Amino acid sequence: MINIALSKGRIFVETLPMLAAAGIVPREDPEKSRKLIIDTNNAGVRLIIIRATDVPTYVQYGAADMGIAGKDVLIEHGGENLYQPLNLKIARCKMMVAAHPAFDYERAVRQGARLRVASKYLTIARDYFSAQGVHVDLIKLYGAMELAPLVKLADVIVDLVSSGGTLKANGLVPVADIMDISARLIVNQAALKLKRAEIQPLLDSFAKAIAAD
Ligand code: ATP
Ligand code: MG
């Protein structure tokens, strides 16, 4: 049996065609079902539906043999015990620094001011500003980062941006581009050795299904 860990929402939706390419069709829609384990048409494959940030943890400990997680989530997790064979090129977005237009980011950075940064992605934020030689106070948030500059919790936020619609709706502007993000296939290293015969064909199908660009 192969357990594949996935999160609901965009990762699940964008993974469906890749699963289909491997001949795997879920028996239920996790958006409609409350089940956390979803069987598929393939008796040897089931899907474990968990929070996006928990996917690397399940795979790290082998509770799931493989999973799909954003590069953001993988960097924050640390990636121990995870083999990352494929960039699936789904759930694409950018990690960016954003601020209120009244905040002069360039000037603050130039003057060596200590920046207050709010984010859910503290490792990415810490590494980015340290590489830029910018001193920061990091404030951990779990969501709705756009609010932080508006109520002066922080000078800037580090957040994922795709269309930019959420930033715009809250009157914020991107001020720096940190990295491109997309979802990766992750595999437990022990499972890869012990269940190679089952896992390798899935890897091959996923590799073929990756959007060319
Ligand atoms: P939750 O929304 O349950 O708090 P989450 O934000 O981590 O959890 P999703 O919003 O489903 O979960 O995001 C899952 C992954 O999709 C993220 O880790 C990221 O890699 C990617 N992602 C997030 N936001 C976007 C976006 N706006 N466009 C494209 N991909 C995104
Ligand atoms: Mg989200």
Image (spheres, rainbow, N blue to C red):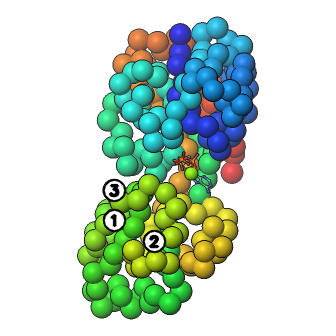
> Which mark is on residue 139?
1
Q: Is residue 152 left or right of residue 146?
A: left
Dividing the picture into quarters, in which one does residue 198 lie?
Answer: top right
Label 2 or label 3, whichever comes before in sequence order = 3
**Amino acid on which disc 3 is placed:** Thr
Label 1 or label 3, whichever comes before in sequence order = 3
Q: Nearer the viewer, mark 2 or mark 3?
A: 2
> Which mark is on residue 148?
2
**Amino acid on which disc 2 is placed:** Ala
Whether residue 23 is situated above or below residue 77 in the rendered picture: above
- How would you rate the neighbour count of disc 3 (Cα within 10 Å): few for under 14, some for 14-19, many for 20 or more? some
CB atoms at circles 1 and 2 under 8 Å apart? yes
As measured in the structure, the alpha-carbon distance from the residue carrying label 1 to the one carrying label 3 is: 12 Å
Q: Is residue 14 left or right of residue 153?
A: right
Where is residue 89? Give x, y as percent: 61, 46
- How would you rate the neighbour count of disc 1 (Cα within 10 Å): few for under 14, some for 14-19, many for 20 or more? some
- Residue at 62% across / 33% down in the picture? 207
Where is residue 76? Give x, y as percent: 37, 49
The reply to whether residue 183 is in sight is yes
Where is residue 133? Give x, y as percent: 27, 76
Whether residue 210 is situated above or below residue 181 in the rendered picture: above
Q: Secondary structure at mark 2?
A: helix
Residue at which label 3 appears = 123
**Amino acid on which disc 1 is placed:** Ile
Label 1 or label 2, whichever comes before in sequence order = 1
CB atoms at circles 2 and 3 under 8 Å apart? no
Q: Is residue 140 left or right of residue 21?
A: left
Q: Secondary structure at mark 1?
A: strand
